[in-house]
Each structure stands twice: as structure tokens, then as C-alpha cells.
Image: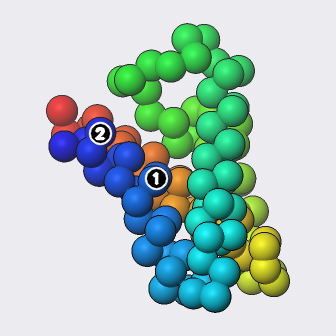
Amino acid sequence: MQQLLHYFLHLVFPVFIAVIFFRKEWKKAYFILLATMLVDLDHLLSNPVFDPNRCSINFHLLHTKYAFFFYVALLFFRKPWNIIGIGLVLHMATDYIDCLFMLNK
């Protein structure tokens, strides 16, 4: 269930966001939303790079609360910055949901 929800929020839900909020250029918006997953490159600085039992929030550099405040600020700029902000906030929310699943195990 956790993995299904995780990948749904990363790959499928952005389609709905793109189509609903950026109808005329939804394909471009969807690509930008997918590109925000590059924020996970900060995982490469960790040892081990991937740990399925590790919460990303406040562990990885680009997953900190300070980075999150920056991502929220992007929401108030013009395109494409607001789309990038939406993608990054959605990414952080998805990772936070993963952390909640881990706490309940």
C-alpha cells in the first residue's frame, strides 16, 4: 500500500494537477512536475544511498524544513517557478506520508 501510494503521488497525481491547473500547457507542466523529482539527487550524499526504513524528511539536505520553506515561497512566483514549487511541495508531502507509514509500523 505504501509503495503504491508513493508512486501514485509522484507519477500519476501530477497529471491531475497539470490538467486541472495548467490546462493549456498541461504537458509542459507535467514535465516540470516530474523534473522536480530530481530533488532526490541529495540521496546520493547519504550512506547508504537508499534505506527503505529511513525517513527522508529532515535527513537529506534538500528535504529539510528550511528547503521546504523555500519551496513554499516558490508558489508565489510566476510560471514556471510556481509549478516547480508545486512539484517540490508535493514531493515533500509524499515523503512525509512515507515517514508516517514508517512510524505506524
For the C terminus, the image quarter is: top left
Query: Which residue is tagged 2?
Result: 3
Closer to us: 22 or 48? 22
For the N terminus, the image quarter is: top left
- CA distance for labels 2 and 1: 11 Å
Residue at left offset 64%, top offset 18% = 46
Residue at left offset 45%, top offset 46% = 95
Q: Is residue 64 left or right of residue 73?
A: left
- What's the residue type where badge 2 is placed? Gln
User: x, y percentage for residue 16?
Assistant: 43, 74
User: x, y percentage for residue 29?
Assistant: 65, 71
Q: Helix, strand or loop at disc 2? A: helix
Residue at left offset 66%, top offset 81% = 25
The residue sitting at the top extreme is: 48
Query: Which residue is tagged 1?
Result: 10
- What's the residue type where badge 1 is placed? His
Residue at left offset 74%, top offset 83% = 76
Q: Helix, strand or loop at disc 1? A: helix
